Image: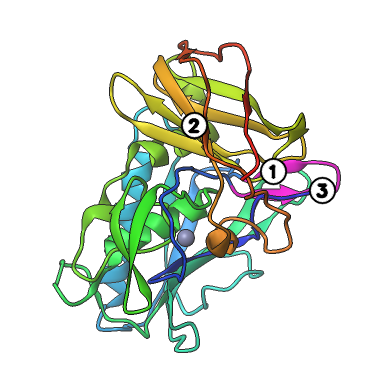
Amino acid sequence: MRRPLALAAGLAIALAASASLQAYLKLGTDTGTSVVAIRWTRQPIQWAVTNRTAAGIAAAQLQGAVERALTTWTSEPGVNLSTSFLGFTSAEPRNGDGLSTIGFQFRPDLDRTLGATSFEVDAVSGEILEADIFFNSNFSWSDSGEASRFDLESIAVHEVGHLFGLGHSALGETELQGGRRRVLGKGAVMFPIAYLPGNLDDRTLEEDDRAGLLDLYGAAARDDHGAIAGRVTLDGQGVFGAHVTAFNTETGALVGTFSLNDRGDFVVAGLSPGIYVIRVEPLDDADLDSFFDDDLPVDVDFRPAFHPRLVAVPPGGAGDPVEIQVQPK
Ligand SMILES: [Zn+2]
């Protein structure tokens, strides 16, 4: 049995890996017989903030930045998500105490991690019971866009995406600079590498983020959106961990996902109705553990391929399943 990602997800400042791939990914839990997407079912989601000043940010400033980040997601049209601030706490952002806590921790050992989200989930139903976010006070932070500091709200939007159950997207492009990866551009806040200090672009969601959110919490919008389902195969066998991207020929919006089982099955949901180009490509192997458990046999030995036909996405459903056949490298 395979699950898409370990139940902890961080945001790196730099990874020694290339990435020009596309996808959103739901976090999942392995029930022993299947993989269940994790999501909140009891709402409003209640959260607390640690009552300490850290990294030059007062507790109330942290609370404000997180509140804005939460609202960025929950105010999306058609999304059924609500949160409620419980208050300030002396608890640490740590799993197992039943309290979803958000706060700074000084973690000089994690010198490439700006923040991370961890979960307690019901392993059978996938219900998220608790989620905790820490921001690493080993870095310099700002809530007002200071040039030399990381933007707290931007990083909070990314971590809150995890808190709601989203994994990483690979929609982004980086270049190697002095042994570290610098982000050239992103098509998703959920891309695992952050922008440089002072950049505020991740305060705003991209189409790929919205699609992932609608997939998890968009029941009310389901009549207005559609999906593409299908398989990725190589010599008739399913390909696991392939990136499947859907490009809207009218709007230029790009949304993607991964094939997540031995059959190579995938579903890209939360799509605006329209005509799409479907492309499949391997995930760069140096980057795999940002997306999948490192013990999973992700298939990367195949060449990128397009589906030979355009695919129509109708409102409220999916067209016929597509099969994309790829060739070995
Ligand atoms: Zn992350």
Let me know if residue 131 appears in the view: no
Q: Which residues are magenta?
A: 27-38
Q: What amino acid does circle 3 point to? A: Met
- Disc 1 crowd rating (10 Å Cα; few below 14, some 14-19, many 20+) is many
In the image, residue 30 lies in the stretch drawn in magenta:
yes
Taking depth in this image into account, of 48 and 266 the one nearest to the observer is 266
Q: Which mark is residue 279?
A: 2
**Quarter of the figure with residue 39:** top right
**Quarter of the figure with residue 36:** top right
Q: Which mark is residue 194?
A: none
Report x, y in % for residue 252.
30, 28
**Residue plotted at (29% across, 67% down):** 152
Query: Which callout, 2 or 3, points at the residue further toward the start of the chain?
Result: 3
Q: Are discs 1 and 2 less than 8 Å apart at CB?
A: no
Report x, y in % for residue 20.
40, 50
Answer left or right for 324 relative to 227: right
Q: CA distance from mark 1 to mark 3?
A: 12 Å
User: Which quarter of the rendering shows the C terminus?
Assistant: top right
**Residue plotted at (29% across, 63% down):** 195
- Ligand 1 neighbours mark 3 (CB distance < 8 Å): no
| Residue 171 versus residue 62 in the image, above or below | above
| Residue 300 versus residue 287 in the image, above or below | above
Q: Which mark is residue 1?
A: 3
**Residue plotted at (18% across, 68% down):** 198
Report x, y in % for residue 304.
52, 39
SS for dot 2: strand
Report x, y in % for residue 25.
54, 45
Query: Which callout, 1 or 3, points at the residue further toward the start of the chain?
Result: 3
Taking depth in this image into account, of 208 and 153 the one nearest to the observer is 208
Determine which residue is flagged by label 1. 240
| Residue 195 versus residue 316 in the image, above or below | below
**Residue plotted at (62% across, 33% down):** 326
